[in-house]
């Protein structure tokens, strides 16, 4: 009796296993065998979760292109061979074109000169004093000063050596009088080529020095707002704001600048520009920022060894702003 019971239990287990095998065969094995003759669908693209770079983007991050040089950006303005013409100078480092503009403004005949400038290196835009020091006051005729400096084109500066004992300023990367900030608007040309203007209280010497200034002028006023539009009011006296011979610098982008010098106080020449007229000229030129330098009898542009503008006086200059070939050729 015990044997028959055990036999029946074993028989039931075997029968149950056979039933399960038959079920698995028809429901799992046969469908898979039928699918072997069908084409495999192409894999679909999967979106990469935000913040998880794909292999391609990760690889691209390992290579950073070299920043574009000014020589490459303005290649069409430079030449491997030096070309000197009556109104232009072109080399592999410098491009200067001088234009004479004659126009009636506000009922007065005006004449001014625009030097359109491209440089391949910030060292091409320099400041110069004859004795190389701002500690003493020395003046020199404009033409002689330009020749001594090796200038392709030059304009008078901000009369800095007459006020060198006070007021923070920078010349060719060297900072002077850092603890004493000027009370006038300033213009700063940084080593990255950008030129920005500031009103008193808008900067500290430490902030400017951190950005590595190349030049800092302290005459003024600034002429354009942040959108490149003429200012409606100027931080200067009414006498300086009135019509006078002018000298100023404008900025388009790093490596591209302009000098503007106007005549004035002449019987047969220009009447002289007001500060508002000077600001409009730079805005019309498309400059992003512009800054007024010393003017009056000091206003002078020298280009290719000649004085461009007629001057009401022959005032000698203490310092000049100039464009020259770099001392170390690339």
Image (cartoon, grey):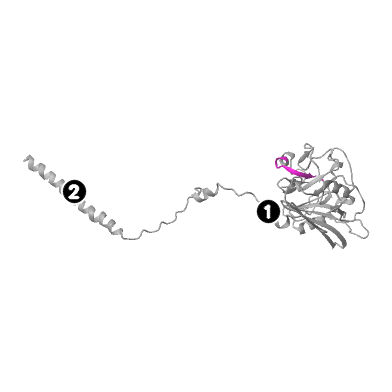
Residue 140 is a magenta residue:
no
Tag in front: 2 or 1: 1
Looking at this view, name the residue that lies furthest to the left. Answer: 1
Helix, strand or loop under label 1: helix
Looking at this view, name the residue that lies furthest to the right. Answer: 267
What residue is shown with label 2?
17
Residue 215 is a magenta residue:
yes
Front residue of 241 and 65: 65
What residue is shown with label 1?
72
Helix, strand or loop under label 2: helix
**Few, some or many residues within 10 Å of mark 1 (<14, 14–19, 20+):** few
Question: x, y percentage for residue 248?
Answer: 81, 52
Which label's residue is closer to the chain start, 2 or 1?
Answer: 2
- Which label was assigned to residue 159? none
- Give the left or right position of residue 168, taking residue 76 as reference: right
Q: Looking at the image, how many numbered discs can be counted on the residues?
A: 2
Which residue lies at the image location 14% right of the left edge and 47% below the top edge?
12
Mark yes or no: residue 16 visible.
Answer: yes
Question: x, y percentage for residue 160?
Answer: 84, 43
Looking at this view, name the residue that lies furthest to the top. Answer: 179
Mark yes or no: residue 96 visible.
Answer: no
Which residue lies at the image location 71% right of the left edge and 41% below the top edge?
207
Residue range of the region highlighted in magenta in the rendering: 209-218
């Amino acid at each position: 009796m015990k044997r028959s019971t055990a036999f029946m239990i074993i028989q039931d287990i075997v029968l149950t296993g056979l039933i399960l095998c038959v079920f698995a065969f028809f429901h799992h094995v046969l469908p898979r065998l039928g699918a072997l003759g069908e084409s495999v669908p192409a894999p679909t693209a999967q979106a990469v979760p935000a913040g998880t770079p794909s292999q391609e983007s990760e690889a691209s991050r390992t290579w950073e292109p070299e920043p574009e040089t000014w020589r490459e950006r303005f290649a069409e303005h430079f030449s491997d061979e030096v070309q000197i013409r009556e109104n232009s100078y072109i080399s592999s480092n410098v491009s200067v074109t001088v234009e004479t503009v004659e126009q009636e403004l506000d009922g007065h005949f005006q004449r001014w000169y625009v030097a359109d400038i491209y440089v391949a290196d910030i060292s091409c835009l320099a400041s110069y004093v004859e004795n190389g020091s701002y500690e003493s006051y020395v003046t020199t005729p404009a033409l002689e000063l330009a020749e001594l400096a090796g200038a392709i084109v030059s304009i008078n500066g901000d009369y800095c050596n007459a006020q060198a004992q006070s007021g923070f300023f920078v010349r060719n990367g060297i900072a002077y009088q850092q603890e004493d900030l000027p009370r006038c608007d300033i213009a700063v040309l940084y080593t990255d080529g950008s030129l920005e203007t500031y009103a008193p209280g808008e900067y500290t010497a430490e902030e400017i020095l951190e950005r590595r200034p190349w030049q800092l002028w302290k005459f003024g006023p600034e002429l354009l707002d942040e959108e490149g539009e003429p200012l409606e009011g100027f931080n200067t006296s009414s006498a300086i704001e009135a019509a006078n011979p002018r000298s100023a610098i404008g900025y388009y982008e790093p490596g591209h600048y302009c000098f503007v010098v106007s005549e004035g106080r002449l019987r047969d020449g220009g009447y002289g520009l007001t500060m508002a007229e000077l600001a409009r000229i730079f805005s019309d030129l498309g400059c992003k920022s512009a800054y007024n330098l010393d003017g009056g009898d000091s206003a002078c542009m020298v280009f290719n060894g000649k004085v461009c503008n007629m001057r009401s006086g022959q005032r000698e200059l203490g310092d000049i702003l100039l464009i020259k070939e770099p001392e170390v050729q690339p």
